[in-house]
Image (tube, rainbow, N blue to C red):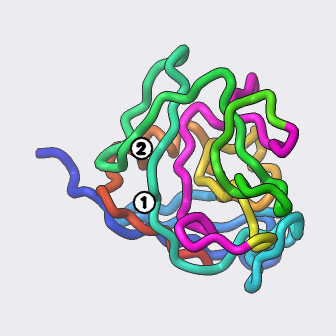
Amino acid sequence: MPPRRLARLRVRPRAGDRARGWLTAGPLRIACALGPAGVVRGKREGDRGTPAGTYRLLWAYWRPDRPRPPAGGVPSRPLRPDQGWCEDPASPRYNRPVRLPAADCTDRMWRDDHLYDLTFVLDQNFTRRAKGRGSAIFLHLARPGLTPTAGCVAIAAADMRRLAPRLARGCVIEIG
């Protein structure tokens, strides 16, 4: 019998190290990387903090040139080599996926370092967007050693392989 799908993930900062935390998902407890400023309330573009709040996992991107990891019940889309994300608050495409090259894009999604091989887009400042309130907040793969992110939540690839297939459609992540 397959494990039940998880509808809620919880992320809490780790005591004594604000750039790391624990992601709890049902019976799983997973170490995670956060932004170097830790969990912040009142997210601002460029503050290097991970925004506190509860956010839906809108969809996942996966690299079609690499083994496809299952994303559970979360809708998934193949990532394109020309995929980027707009982080310019002055742009009308702020906090939206864009095709490269784009003058207003500062985050390239197609990466050599595997961080975005499987990436979940969080509904942080996406559905109800406000200029300068943060962009490109994802749940993605971590760098070796769980080094800090720019504000996302990141977990080891092995942990993502255990977690992703168990995620339910409509899953939310609670940070803080």
Left or right: 65 with respect to 37? left
- Residue at the spot of label 1: 28
Q: Of the residues shown, which amino acid type is indicated by label 2?
A: Arg
Q: Residue furthest front?
A: 92
Q: Is residue 40 above or below residue 78?
A: below
User: Most prominent secondary structure in the magenta stretch?
Assistant: loop
| Residue at 68% in and 24% down | 82
Q: Quadrant of the C terminus?
A: bottom right
Residue 165 position in % (x across, y down): 34, 43
Q: Quadrant of residue 123?
A: bottom right
Marking on residue 83: none
Left or right, residue 30 beside residue 56: right
Q: Residue 116: which quarter of the image?
A: top right
Q: Secondary structure at mark 2?
A: helix
Q: Dot 2: within a 10 Å radius of its alpha carbon, few (fewer than 14), some, or many (20 or more) residues?
A: few
- Please tell me which residue lies in front, 158 or 111: 111
Q: Is residue 114 above or below residue 126?
A: above
- What is the magenta range? 103-130
Residue at horizontal 67%, vertical 67%?
21
Where residue 52 sits: x, y (%)?
65, 79
